[in-house]
Image: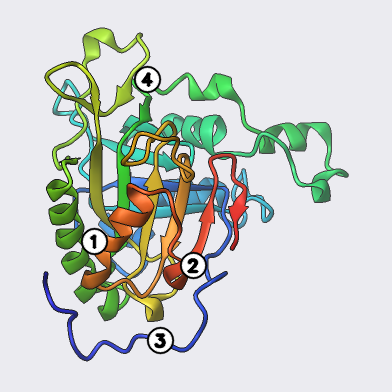
């Protein structure tokens, strides 16, 4: 096990519980990179998916709604490669919806609007919007028809381990993030998880059939799989290492029982390499929250978890 890097100013005094900012959905943009500029929307001179989504959903945007917080993060996960490799396309995970959107063409603002309108807007508006006109209300509500414009969308069956590694924003996460990613990958593999690193493959000839992302063993049974990625700033650098665990719906515990945290996202802070084994044993395999590390959590329907 690697040692905890020395000299990092970590806050060990403040209670972690409740330090997660509430949100309805997280968008994990697959950049294939391990670090980004301090503001992720400035990457590539502003030509990027995070900037496009924020233009639509941020303050002043067409779908801006202060009562519906969508967290937009860059991740180190690689994007799916389109069948025609000359097409520039970005992929994204949506959690806790546990959806994977493989193809968001860079030149198509229609696809970004389909992502926002079809998957990210609320299905029900906050009562504060009661006085809006019917047209304005309709614009702020989700439209599943719009979501159907995006093809190849998958259900996610992998455990997702997200580690803040945003060195371009704060040195603490920049130093600790890669160390924790390596330790999570090593420990998951030692517990018979398939640790996936390659891009998600989409078989274009069967795109019209329902799919799920996951792996199967030689007998055709579903095998536990996981992806460990670095992500951009989630708030609370002083609590590094910051880790979010997304346990997919339908997950089972190590002894085959229903997983209490299936479909949930669990935020941990002050995670050190020595904690990784216990996090996998207790939370990923056991379905239990570790109170000492708990910053907050979310259920699949958007309900915030509290201790």
The tag on residue 11 is 3
Mark 3 secondary-structure assignment? loop
Q: CA distance from mark 2 to mark 4?
A: 35 Å
Q: CA distance from mark 1 to mark 4?
A: 38 Å
Coordinates of residue 249 in the picture (x, y in percent):
44, 34
Question: Dividing the image into 4 quarters, which one contains the N terminus?
Answer: bottom left
* Residue 201 location, quadrant: top left
Q: CA distance from mark 1 to mark 2?
A: 19 Å
Q: CA distance from mark 3 to mark 4?
A: 44 Å
Coordinates of residue 251 in the picture (x, y in percent):
39, 35
Q: CA distance from mark 1 to mark 3?
A: 22 Å
The answer to whether 72 appears left or right of 103 in the picture is right
Toward the right, the furthest residue is: 131
The residue located at (15%, 28%) in the rendering is: 86
Pointer 4 residue: 151
Mark 2 secondary-structure assignment? strand
Coordinates of residue 177 in the picture (x, y in percent):
23, 67
Tell which of 39 and 184 is nearer to you.
184
Q: CA distance from mark 3 to mark 2?
A: 13 Å
The residue located at (41%, 65%) in the rendering is: 268
The tag on residue 277 is 1
Disc 3 to disc 4: CB gap under 8 Å? no
Pointer 2 residue: 295
């Amino acid at each position: 096990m690697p040692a905890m890097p020395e000299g990092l100013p970590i806050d060990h005094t403040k209670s972690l519980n409740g330090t997660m900012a509430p949100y309805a959905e997280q968008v994990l943009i697959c950049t294939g990179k391990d670090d980004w500029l301090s503001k992720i929307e400035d990457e590539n001179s502003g030509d990027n998916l995070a900037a496009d989504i924020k233009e639509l959903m941020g303050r002043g945007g067409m779908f801006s709604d202060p009562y519906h917080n969508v967290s937009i993060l860059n991740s180190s996960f690689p994007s799916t490669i389109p069948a025609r490799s000359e097409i520039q396309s970005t992929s994204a995970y949506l959690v806790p919806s546990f959806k994977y959107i493989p193809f968001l063409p860079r030149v198509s603002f229609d696809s970004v609007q389909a992502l926002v309108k079809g998957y990210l807007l609320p299905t029900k508006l906050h009562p504060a919007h009661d006085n809006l006109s019917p047209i304005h209300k309709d614009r702020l509500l989700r439209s599943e028809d719009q979501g159907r414009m995006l093809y190849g969308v998958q259900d996610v069956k992998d455990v997702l381990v997200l580690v803040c590694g945003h060195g371009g924003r704060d040195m603490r996460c920049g130093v600790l993030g890669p160390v924790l990613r390596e330790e999570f990958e090593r420990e998951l593999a030692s517990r018979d998880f398939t640790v996936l690193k390659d891009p998600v493959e989409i078989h274009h000839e069967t795109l019209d059939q329902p799919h799920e992302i996951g792996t199967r063993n030689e007998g055709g049974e579903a095998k536990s799989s996981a992806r460990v990625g670095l992500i951009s700033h989630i708030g609370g650098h002083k609590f590094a290492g910051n880790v979010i665990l997304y346990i997919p719906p339908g997950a089972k515990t190590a002894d085959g029982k229903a997983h209490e945290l299936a479909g949930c996202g669990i935020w941990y802070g002050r995670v050190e390499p020595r904690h990784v084994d216990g996090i996998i044993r207790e939370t990923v395999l056991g379905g239990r929250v570790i109170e000492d590390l708990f910053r907050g959590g979310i259920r699949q329907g958007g309900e915030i978890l509290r201790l």
